[in-house]
Amino acid sequence: MTFHQIDRRALLRGAGAGLGALLAGGMLAACGSDGGRNPLLTTSSGPSVAPRRGGRLRAAFAGSAAESTNVLQATNSAVDYVRARLIWDTLGEIDDSKPVWRLAESVEPNADATRWTVRVRDGVTFSDGRKLTAEDVLFSLRTLAGNPTTQAGLLAGIDPAASAVRDPRTVELVLKSPDGFFDLALAQSAFVIPNATTDFSHAVGSGPFVLKSWTRGASSLLTARGDYWGTALGGGPYLDEIELSSVADAGARINGLKAGQFDYAGGITLTAARAEARNPGVRVITAPKELWSDLALTMNLGQHPFDRPAVLQAVRYAIDREAMVRTVTLGYGEVADDALGRHQSWYDSSLPRRAYDPGRAKKALADAGLSDVKLSVRTSDYEYGTLESATAFVQQAQAAGITVGVDKIPAADYYTDFTSLLSTPLQTNLYHAMPLPLQLSFFYGPKASYPFTGPAGPTLDGLLTAMHAAVGDARRTKAVQDVQHHLYDQGGDAVFARIPPVAAAKPTVQGVKALGSFDYPCLRDAFLSS
C-alpha cells in the first residue's frame, strides 16, 4: 500500500473527499419538497435576517479516538474537520461541483494540463501577522502530498522537485502526467500553513478563527479574528466564539440540541430526522442531492465468485432498489442506477435503471452453470444504512436462489483491517459525495487509493488515463461518462440507493454552509439571529 492509501475511516467520513456544492443561502439548503410527501426535504433560500454579530455558537459533531489539532490529521473525524476549516484557509472550495478560489486568486492549466499556475491572493495574513506568499502555498502542497494525509492521494500527481515559486504570488505546479481535473484536487481541503512549519499540531492558519483551548474527546473553543482578510469580501466571522463538542453518539447529539446544550447537531440519523421533522424548536436540514451518499454492494472482481460475470449480473438484479429506499432510507432517499455521482454535472443520466428481477438473476446463474450460490457480505453499523441494507439483501436474494450470510464487524474495527477491506469478496459501502472525476480515480483503476472492486483491467486503465488527459468542459464530461459506462457494464459496485445526510439546528442558527461537504460544514459565516 502506498503512502496515499490513507485512513479509510477519514476518507469515507468525508475527509478531503466527501465534497460537493455550496448550498444557497444561510442554513444548509435541502433538495426540494419531494412533491410534498416528505416534510424533511424542504428548500432554504437564504438567511431570514441580515447577519448579526456577536455570540457563541455551540455545535456538536462526531469525534474519534484519533482526534488531533495536527493539520496533517485534520480530517480524521468530523469535529476535527469542522475545526480545521475555521483555523486554516484553503486554496479553494467547491460550489456546484466547481472550484471557487479562496487563497488562490486563480488556477490555470497549460494547453495539455501538465502544468498548472496558481496565482496567490494578495493581502492575506496568518493569525500571527505573517503575510501569505507563494512559498507558503508550495510548502503546504508538498507537505500534504508527501505525508500520509487524506489529501495525499489527490495531490500525488505533483512533481515536487520540478514545481517552483516563480514570484511572491505565483506557483507553477508541474505534474507527472496530464490531469485536466487537477483544479478540483486543489479545491479539496488544501489547507495552507506557513513555509517551513515543523510543529504541525500548532500550525498557524489564515482562517477566521484561532484555537483558544482544546481537549481531546471533549470540546474546543475558537475565537474570531478581528483582522481576518475575508471580512473585507463581505463575509464573516460574525460570531465571537465557536464551541465544538465531540459527541460520538448521534442520539446524544440530537438530545443535546433539544435540551439546549447545543445549537447545531451534525450527523443525525434519519429516524431522528423523521421524529423531529415537525418540531418547531428543531430545524431538520439536509443536503442538495448532489451531496447525498451512495449505498452499494461492492463485489471484488479479483475474488471468487465475482470473477464470474454471471454472478455480478445476478447480484445486481437480485437487489430490490425500491424496497431499499422505502425501508433502509425510510423513504427519504432515492433509487441509484449502479453509478456514483448522480445529480452532478458530469453524471450520465442516460444510464438505464436495473429493475428488481430475481428470475433474471436466477437464469443468469443457471446459464453459467451455477447453482446454490452462497455469499457472505461483510458489513458494520459504523454508519447508518450499511448494516440495514445488508440485512435487507438477505431476504431479497433468496428469490434469486442466492443464499446470503451477514458478517457484522464491530464498528471500531471495520476500517482498520486494510487487508480485509481490499480483499473481501462482498461488502457494503457508503460512498460520501465528492466531485465525480476525483471519486472515480479514488476508488477505481491502477492508481486508486481504495480499489475495493479489485484490480483494474487495461480497458478501465485506458479510460481513466484518457479522462485525466481531457481538457475542456465537453471533452472532460464525455471522458467521465465513458468511465461510467464501463463501470456500469463491467464494474464491481452495485450502487442501489442514495441516502441524504442530515443535521439539525435551532431556528436561530443561520449562515452554515456546506461548501463541498455537508457532514463537515463551514461555519465561517455562521451567526445567531437572536
Image (tube, rainbow, N blue to C red):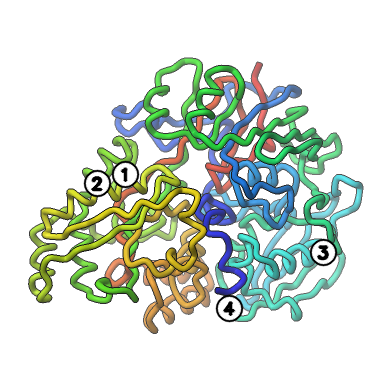
Q: Quadrant of residue 404?
A: bottom left
| Pointer 4 residue | 178
User: Distance from label 4 to label 2 (Cα)?
Assistant: 43 Å
Q: Quadrant of residue 210?
A: top right
User: Residue sitting at 46 percent across and 48 percent down?
Assistant: 411
Q: Amino acid at mark 1?
A: Glu
User: Distance from label 4 to label 1 (Cα)?
Assistant: 41 Å
| Pointer 1 residue | 388
Which tag, 3 or 1, sits closer to the chain's start?
3
Q: Check contact, mark 4 vs mark 2: CB within 8 A.
A: no
The image position of residue 91, as x and y in percent, is 70, 56
Which tag, 4 or 2, sits closer to the chain's start?
4
Determine whether 242 is above or below 121 in the image: above
The image position of residue 195, as x and y in percent, is 85, 62
Q: Is residue 204 left or right of residue 516?
A: right
Q: Is residue 165 left or right of residue 191?
A: right
User: Residue sitting at 86 percent across and 38 percent down?
Assistant: 227
Residue at the outermost right position: 129
| Pointer 3 residue | 134
User: Residue sitting at 85 percent across and 49 percent down?
Assistant: 126
